[in-house]
Amino acid sequence: MEINKISSAVNTEFNTNKGVTTHKKNSEVETQSLAKQQDISNDWKLLAQAQQTLQSVSDVDMDKVANIRNALSNGSFEIMLDKIADKILAQHGK
């Protein structure tokens, strides 16, 4: 079996256009890539700011802990089992 190379004007034009198209696509890809990097950079800045804010906020409401501790020590703390049961059922969907 013999394979002969076929040369034509269409093939040449296609290759020429392909090079221009590839250049345009590369430029568009670079622009999109820069835009995505900018978006990621802005998101990262927001996350860093949120982290700083969260570090300044206490995980525990110490005033509430002190009130409960005082109520337990003086015997005035009430446990409302009906409300606790209702909340458990509401939370677990039963």
Image: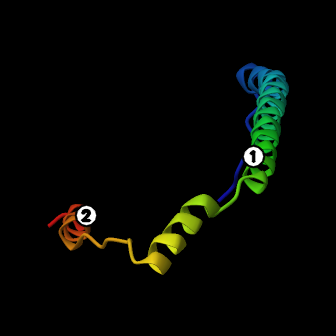
**Tag 2 residue:** 87
User: Badge 2: few (under 14), some or many (20 or more) residues near its Cα, within 10 Å?
Assistant: few
Q: Left or right of 42: which side holds 63?
A: left
Mark closest to the chain's N terminus, 1 or 2: 1
Point out residue 23 in the picture as x, y percentages from the top left corner: 85, 26
Mark 1 to mark 2 CA distance (whole Å): 33 Å
Q: In the structure shown, which secondary structural element does the residue marked by tag 2 occupy?
A: helix
Callout 2, which amino acid?
Answer: Lys
Q: Position of residue 54 (x, y in %)?
A: 72, 52
Residue beneath the point at 52% across and 71% down: 70
Q: Quadrant of the C terminus?
A: bottom left
Closer mark to the observer between disc 1 and disc 2: 2
Q: Nearer the viewer, residue 29 or 73?
A: 73
Q: How is the image coloured?
A: rainbow
Q: Is residue 41 above or below residue 17?
A: below
Which of the 4 image quadrants contains residue 19?
A: top right
Q: Residue at x 81, y 22 (%)?
A: 24
Three-letter amino acid code at the position of disc 1: Leu
11 and 26: which is toward the camera: 26
Residue wearing tag 1: 47
Dot 1 crowding, Cα within 10 Å, few <14, some 14–19, many 20+: few
Q: Is residue 90 left or right of residue 7?
A: left
